[in-house]
Image: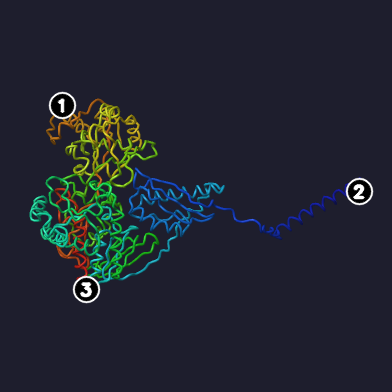
Amino acid sequence: MKRKLCLLLCLILILITAAGCTQETQQDEPEPPAMEDTDSSPEAMMAPGTYTAQAYGFSMSWPDILRVTVSENAIESIAFDQESGSTSSMIDAVAAAMFPRILENQSVNVDIVSGATVTSVAARTAIEDCLKQAIVAAGNEESAISEFKKPQEKSGGSQELETQVLVIGMGGGGTYTALRAAEEGVDVLVIEKQGRYGGTTALTSEIQSINPPRIKEKYNNGEDFTDADAMYEAWTEYTEGDAKKEMLDLYFEKSGPALDWLALDHGAMFDFDPKPGFTPADWYKVKFQWYPNTSPEHPDAPTHGYNKREIASYFDKLVEDFTELGGQYMLETEAYELITDDTGAVVGAKAKNKLTGTEYTIKADAVVIATGGFLGSREMTSEYLSNEYFPLKGAWKIYGSYGNDGKMIQSAIDIGAATYNIGMPPEVHMSGSDMFIPHSYGFAINKVEGQKSFNTGKQSVWSVADLPMFLGITPNSLAVGMDGERFTSETGVAMLDPWIAGPNFYSIWSSEQINDIRDNGFKHFLGGVSSGFLGYTGDIPVNTPLPEAYDVLDAGIEMGFIYKADTIEELAKAIDIDPSALKNTVESYNNYCKNGKDEQFNKDAEYLEAIGEGPYYAIKMASYSYNTCAGLDVNTKLQVLNTSGEPIEGLFCVGSDCAGVLFTEKKPYVTYGGANNGWVLTSAYVCGEAVADYVSDK
């Protein structure tokens, strides 16, 4: 028995020892490498081919369509379909700037194109969709898209540059100034924060010019297009003497030669039969529309809403002319601070490349500010716009570029620059709802047969989702400002008068009225500026029942720009208006409707419709602006003046950044047509020569 027990203990000891030796061997000696399978290959990330996806960008009525071609493991090419809805200039900017970044980095997580933000985001969304399709088609999980979402690396660093003339901004004003200065034989560098040149100017319809001498010789038998003396007198009377006389004189003298230079010397094309302005009183033929402004198929129908690719080609030619003269430019490079010397003279600017992160110190003999105003800065519009005559302070909706944020105007003010009429109303041509109900809510989009959109040139469509905007602009509405009072006849809120209320106003409706629209549709034609540019860009047809009306209003309530209450007083509280003020306004308006006479603004009796039984609705509306009209004070050489009225050495300014010298804070931008664009061209034409003379004398 003892012998058996001893043998068992020995066996256990042997097994334990063996186990310990095995463990040590596993710790000290690596396993032999696995044999390579020479027949295997890396698993394909994507199924090769071309994939298509769409997303809504700049246009709510027509999506952007992207086509992406991939190999097993790489993005090979990206292209917009020609039927994409964004404006051509936005499409071209994104294709030229963002697509190469995606291909180089093999990632959709690259910088968007400033100045084409919405189109960039839509393109990125559609490209990502295409990649997911390709990944799934290869049998992989959609989550593998992470391989194509790596962040773009920025090189950073700093660099010092030198030039004679530094132009900040490459919209119309900056491009014209740079070219004109380069023609005078000086070294010019232009920097632009956006990913494209042309700025807001390339999105406009016309330029104002007063009797351009060479054009009138060539196209009007040498006769004046308009009575310049009468127009000058009307302009002076309108601005009540607040416009600087020497600057108005300069504009009337030089706007003609400036257009001659742009059109005849540099190939920008216009309709050389100028048009009058917006109102019957503005009969002066000074509005030269960019060409083409009609289509061969419909020669009587305006198409200058969607001629932006042609305008962009004119800017391509201007930039080509500029670079052939030795001029240099950098896009996506934002200036943020002026540099001064010990005497207070401006000797350059600091800037940063938004793509690479590189910091630049740019030394220059002269700097020209051409940045397009400050409407994109809530801080500046709240500080500098005036409430003395109208309630203008606050954040404004923009039809244009939110990148026009006034950094360089503020930098000039910080070093002592004076302003002129900076508090005047922004340039507003239209109104719309404060927000727009997106496609995700599922409201139908309806074609308008045989009609193209003025703005996009694509199939014209309308949607009941635009009901809030049309409630706000139809002439039989009741519009009140943020104080609860009417501010104009509602026949003017769609186009010329919304700015009177400031950035926002409210349209007030009763359920009784909404029921009628639901069952019978709108009574009055709703076409005009607003519907051509905002929302789905097509008119809701009159006398068309809208059974989804309350569904749309509920969507707006959910989004936060439509309000509902059982009484007018409760509605007023919901929109932060004095209840007694709104109640009094509604009662007075209803009396006007009952008596058939608007004693306040003389609105035609045809449009007087009483606010009936509740519940009640308030739609928040917005004044949509192109830009601010005023900023820095300048002299006839476009030198920026200090608060003592003396030129700041080395600092010049053109365009919207100084257009206030032509206007008054008491009234809006003049309605002759194209005046702001006319000043952009004229001031740049004069400044280019003046700044070249200035640096040549140094």
Name the amino acid, label 2. Arg
Looking at the image, which residue sits at the far front? Answer: 297
Residue found at x 33% / y 70%: 161
- Whether residue 299 is situated above or below residue 574 in the rendered picture: below
> Given the image, on which type of amino acid does mark 1 rest?
Lys
Q: Nearer the viewer, mark 2 or mark 3?
A: 3
Q: Quadrant of the N terminus?
A: top right
The tag earlier along the polypeptide, 1 or 2, is 2
Q: Which residue is mark 1?
A: 594
The residue carrying pointer 3 sits among few (fewer than 14), some (14 to 19) or many (20 or more) residues within 10 Å by Cα, namely few
Q: Which mark lies nearer to you, 1 or 2?
A: 1
Q: Which residue is mark 3?
A: 696
Please state the horizontal and vertical placement of residue 61, each as a whole percent of the image: 34, 43
For mark 2, does the 10 Å Cα neighbourhood hold few (<14), some (14 to 19), or many (20 or more) residues? few
N-term mark: 2 or 3: 2
326, 600: nearer the viewer: 326
Q: Residues within 10 Å of mark 1 (few under 14, many from 20)?
A: some
The quarter of the displayed image where residue 24 is located: bottom right
- The kind of secondary structure element at disc 2 is helix
**Mark carried by residue 325:** none
Please provide percent x and percent y for residue 668.
17, 48
Q: Secondary structure at mark 1?
A: helix
Q: Is residue 367 left or right of residue 10?
A: left
Residue type (three-letter) at the residue carrying disc 3 = Ser
The residue indicated by pointer 2 is 3
Indicate the secondary structure of the residue bearing disc 3. helix
Q: Residue at x 84, y 51 (%)?
A: 11
- 138 or 332, which lies in front? 138
Q: CA distance from mark 2 to mark 3?
A: 116 Å
